[in-house]
Image (cartoon, grey):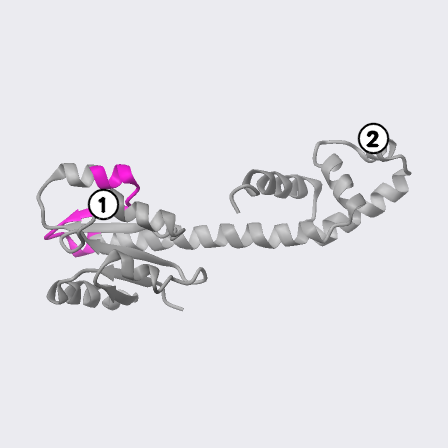
Amino acid sequence: MSPLVHIVDHDEASHGGIESMLQANGYRTRVYIRPHDILHHHPSDTVASCVVIDTTAPDESIPDILGLFSKASLALPVIFLTDKADVRVGVRAMKAGAEDFFMKPFDPEEFIGAVDRAISRQRLFHEQIDWIRDNLARLEKLTKREREVLDLVVRGNINKQVAFTLGTTVRTIKAHRRKVMEKMQVHSIVELASCAERLGLMRSIV
């Protein structure tokens, strides 16, 4: 499915031009009058998307808009447009967490480039979240003993040390380790350790 760009602009003539530009570059578009309206049509997590907001339209300040999206857990890159030739507005937008900021009139190629980057970043975000969810699901399938073996192996313990710690035989530990690697879909201890490290770092975020 083509990526989606959410446009917030109360001026039909203005957003019509932006819509045409985006559609000509392969993007689907959806138009809203106010930033709040996006929250009633919450974008799907499965579709890479971003938001383009003309700050001439909404009453809220840029930090207010970004705060609104943050409270609603709407983790989308936001690009702001303005007709106010004030560099300070752009600086405040970037500090507040905007993906990019353009003063009108702007270079169409630069604008599309910013949208491309925002969509690429969103796709990468989706891929990372999918990876974490998939591997957490695999982790849940491990038995208690397999989880104990995993925890010890990824800390650098050899089979003999793991067997001693758990009060069992090396042969049993080897069997458990094979099962752990099968269930986690990895092919080496290094890969298993890397996977465990990523899950440990990311668990609190998911």
List x then y, in percent, for residue 199.
60, 43
Query: Could you say whether the residue bearing mark 2 is in a helix, strand or loop?
Result: helix
Quarter where residue 145 is shown: top right
List x then y, in percent, for residue 94.
25, 40
List x then y, in percent, for residue 176.
82, 46
The residue wearing badge 1 is 62
Quarter where residue 97 is shown: top left
Taking the image as shown, residue 176 lies to the left or right of residue 133, namely right
Q: What residue lies at 62% left-to-right and 50% top-to-bottom?
A: 136
Q: How many marks?
A: 2
Tell me which numbered mark, 2 or 1, is placed earlier along the sequence.
Answer: 1
Answer above or below: position of 10 versus 99. Answer: below
Q: Is residue 185 visible?
A: no
The residue wearing badge 2 is 161
List x then y, in percent, for residue 87.
13, 38
Q: Amino acid at mark 2?
A: Gln
Q: Badge 1, how many Cα within 10 Å: few under 14, some, many 20+?
A: many
Q: Quadrant of the N terminus?
A: bottom left
Query: Could you say whether the residue bearing mark 1 is in a helix, strand or loop?
Result: helix
In the image, which is nearer the foreground, mark 2 or mark 1?
Answer: 1
Q: Is residue 199 visible?
A: yes
Q: Amino acid at mark 1?
A: Ile
User: For the magenta stretch, what is the residue range?
Assistant: 92-110
- Do labels 2 and 1 touch, CB within 8 Å? no
Q: Is residue 95 magenta?
A: yes
Taking the image as shown, residue 128 lies to the left or right of residue 194, namely left
Answer above or below: position of 89 versus 72. Answer: above
Marks 2/1: CA–CA distance? 57 Å
Taking the image as shown, residue 177 lies to the left or right of residue 198, namely right
Q: What residue lies at 24% left-to-right and 61% top-to-bottom?
A: 7
